[in-house]
Image (cartoon, rainbow, N blue to C red):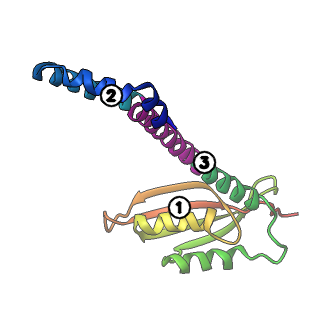
Amino acid sequence: MMDGLLKKFGIFSEISRTFRGLNKRERRLLIGALLLTLIVVLDLAVVSPMYRSSVRLRKEVKNDRVSLVEMQDLYEKHKKYEVVLRGSESVPKNFSIMTYLQGVANAVGVSYDSIQPRTSSDNATSYIDVRLKNINLYQLTRLLYRIELGGEYQLKVKRLNVRTSYNNQSLLDVGLQVVIPGASNE
């Protein structure tokens, strides 16, 4: 249809006749101007919108990555709070802290030097004083994790006393106080 209109008005023949009437230098200038115009039009119509879209998408990906990191941090906080809430539940009546702590120690690969049940002066809180000798830092971190977060019951380490062993400077002597949440001596 467009071709028919151009032929009807004789535009092709007029352009062709005008082009043939130009000298060699003018033809080159005209072809260069047409190519430059074509490049500018392609840049404005295709390249620039694609580049702007690419920049926008990169910004969105960057923002989404930041959001993802924030969501992962929030998820980790949620899991910690969930553990704290779960740990604040009372332990069952038949719960034996001594057996439970011995199981934790066996799982970590340490043995207690001494373990003594205690109660607070007002008999409101039960806790255990634990002493360990000659353990390494890795075992200590695993033990603390298992007591506070990794076990069936989440107990709380109220006090922690760590010093290097007298016999071996690469090992630790540890004293800790484990509080039994929800348990009382009534």
Separation of disc 2 and disc 3 at Cα?
Answer: 67 Å
Disc 2 marks which residue?
13
Residue type of the residue flagged with mark 2: Ser
- Answer left or right for 20 relative to 45: left
Instruction: Answer whether residue 67 is magenta in the image.
Output: yes
Say if 129 sits above or below 27 in the image.
Answer: below
Q: Secondary structure at mark 3?
A: helix
Point 22% across, 22% down: residue: 30
Residue type of the residue flagged with mark 1: Gly
Instruction: Examine the image and state in which quarter residue 22 appears.
Output: top left
Numbered circle sitting on residue 175? 1
Q: Nearer the viewer, residue 108 or 114?
A: 108
Disc 3 marks which residue?
71
Instruction: Examine the image and state in which quarter residue 18 appears.
Output: top left
Q: Number of marks in the image?
A: 3
- Answer left or right for 123 relative to 7: right
Residue type of the residue flagged with mark 3: Met
